[in-house]
Image (tube, helix red, strand yellow):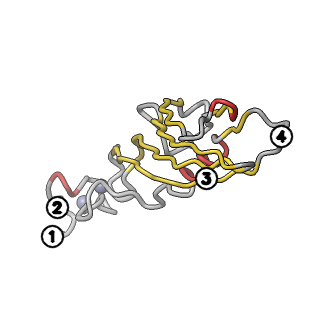
Amino acid sequence: MKININQIPTGGLTLEEDESASALDLETETIKFPQALRIKARLFKITNIVSADVILSTALRTICSRCLNEIEIDFQKSLKLNYQVSKSEQVVDLNPEIREEIIVDYPLKPLCSQNCKGLCPKCGKNLNEGDCYCAST
Ligand SMILES: [Zn+2]
Ligand SMILES: [Zn+2]
């Protein structure tokens, strides 16, 4: 999200925008974005400071670290950003900070559910779908 500083009135400005995950370079080997990133921002300009209250919402598609099933996780985050701007600056780009705030919240060990039983280490069966016979042999 790029903000044209001169378009922020005294009372502030509310913007809503979708950014694609690829535009922000968010996808990794294991984290995908099935939908765009929704950015809501409330912007204020006070002398040479531009401040933004930002609410991010989207969904992540990743893989359960125990059973390897594909899962989708809702992602919501609100953040406050401040930028010092000089007179010659016309545009503030929020995307680098937004990108960073999303990436630090990537789940390290995502789970399809807290009770996920995972895979049998012997036969590889997904134990959420039922027991295998390895334990009894
Ligand atoms: Zn699982
Ligand atoms: Zn088994």
Determine which of the numbered discs, if any, sits on residue 133 in the image. Answer: 2
Q: Secondary structure at mark 3?
A: strand
Seen as rendered, the residue at the extreme right is 88
Placement of 2 over or under 122, stated as above or below: above
From the viewer's perspective, tell me whether residue 114 is left or right of residue 27: left
For label 1, the residue is 136
Mark 1 → mark 2, Cα distance in angstroms: 6 Å
Q: Quadrant of the N terminus?
A: top right
Determine which of the numbered discs, if any, sits on residue 81 in the image. Answer: 3
Circles 1 and 2 in contact, beta carbons < 8 Å: yes
Residue at (16, 61) in percent of width and height: 133
Mark 4 → mark 1, Cα distance in angstroms: 75 Å
From the viewer's perspective, tell me whether residue 53 is left or right of residue 64: right
> Which of 59 and 68 lies nearest the eye of the viewer?
59
Instruction: Identify residue type, mark 4.
Output: Lys
Quadrant for ligand 1 reads bottom left
- Mark 2 or mark 3: which comes first in sequence? 3
Instruction: Identify residue type, mark 1.
Output: Ser
Determine which of the numbered discs, if any, sits on residue 87 in the image. Answer: 4
Q: Secondary structure at mark 2?
A: loop
Query: Is the shortest distance between ligand 2 and the CB of mark 2 under 8 Å?
Result: yes
Percent from the top left, x then y, of residue 52?
57, 47
Placement of 51 over or under 117, stated as above or below: above
**Residue 113: which quarter of the image?**
bottom left
Q: Residues within 10 Å of mark 3 (few under 14, many from 20)?
A: some
